[in-house]
Amino acid sequence: MDAEGGSELIFPHEPMMHWQQSDLDNLLLWSVEQGASDICLQPSHAVWIRQHGRWLPVTQREISSEEIFELVDQVSGTASSSAQLKGSKDLDFAYEVSTGRFDAERFRINATACRDGWGTGAEVTIRSIPSLPPRLERLDVEQEIMDHAFPDRGLILVTGTVGTGKSTLLASILRYIREHQERKIVTYEAPVEFDLMGIPDPKGPLVQTGIPEHLAEFGTAPRNAMRRAVDVMLVGESRDRETLWGMLEAAETGVAAYSTVHTQSVADTPSRIINVFPTDMQQQVASTLISSLRLVVQQRLEPSPQGGRVPLKEYLVFNRSVRDTVIHADLRDIPSTVQDLVEQRGRSILKDAKDKYDAGLIFGETMQKIEREQEKED
């Protein structure tokens, strides 16, 4: 079924016998034309695409594990990739399909071993990535976020679950900086997604560093950035203790640091970071974190009656007054303190959803789902 519940959506160039790299390239280009954000190759099933948030089967024949392993070897550029998967190692890499002499569609690929009957197969998830991130104006970013997303120093976090547009929002912020500010930007990404180095008419240098191709791990990124005369840095993932502490130190010493955190609300974000550290460090981490924070944005994407998906945002600007309030709260009270501040001085996800619903941008079912979520949290 298509996104409107009508006729079937079928890939017209499905190979009859065996998938080759050229067939996958055709599938990826066709999926982009259909507005798909993700493509999933799952053993012993049809190929799936995610169109406007809905998963749809788009082939008539099941794809086999053998075919998937061969495709991974071909598109990753190394014949040992399938052996790595069978050895319990997942793979993350970028992939391009040429569309002309100087043009290409870009994709981010994850391959992970999985069960296939009684044996081992592989699942491949492919995300479509525009060559350049959209400009912030196209994302309809709220003016209050625009006013506080470009500090001279400090920490800016974008939170949310997988597939909620966090990377796109951050890449668009970096595009704005590169187009308007004379600052050096360095990114640390796994893998590199948008071609930020290709942004025309830059005001300052920008270098993209892949993890682990160019630098072994995220934990070394903050220290590396400090040796590269960086004004702005993006760390694609901030999960481990070393990376988080390094980012806090960098933000304190004059760098504008941007990163993502997998939390589902602004209020949960500081405590999630603090709890990564041992108990005897948490008070120090809390003080450093709150002093460094400048903005936290939580984003989710929901289907729209007007087609596609619309972003819903919750955010809080951590100005001096907000930081003073949070830094004096007991560690256990930080989530409730931040939630109160979101309600009083920021924008809650419920308020944003109500405004979007009143404007006809989200469905009633989405509005009811968010109301139920908030009632459970209360």
Image: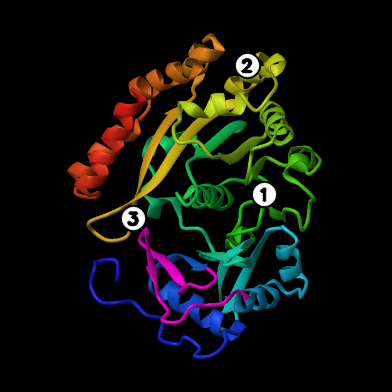
Near mark 1 (Cα within 10 A), the count class, few <14, some 14-19 or many ≥20, is: many
Residue 302 point in image, percent of width and height: 33, 50
The C terminus sits in image quarter: top left
Quick check: 325 above or below 164?
Answer: above
Tag 3 secondary structure = strand
**Residue 50 drawn in magenta:** yes
The residue carrying mark 3 is 309
Near mark 3 (Cα within 10 A), the count class, few <14, some 14-19 or many ≥20, is: some
Q: Nearer the viewer, mark 1 or mark 2?
A: 2
The residue carrying mark 1 is 187
Q: Earlier in the sequence, mark 3 or mark 1?
A: 1
Asked whether residue 151 is in view, the answer is no
Q: Which residue is drawn at the image coordinates 76% and 47% (left, top)?
A: 217
Quick check: 4 above or below 8?
Answer: above
**298 lies left or right of 105:** left
Residue 117 point in image, percent of width and height: 57, 67
Residue 33 point in image, percent of width and height: 41, 75
Q: CA distance from mark 1 to mark 2?
A: 26 Å
Magenta-tinted stretch: 42-65
* Amino acid on which the number 2 mark rests in the picture: Ser
Q: Who is closer to the viewer here, 213 or 125?
A: 125
Q: Earlier in the sequence, mark 2 or mark 3?
A: 2
Q: How many marks?
A: 3
The residue carrying mark 2 is 287
Quick check: 353 above or below 249?
Answer: below
**290 lies left or right of 139:** right
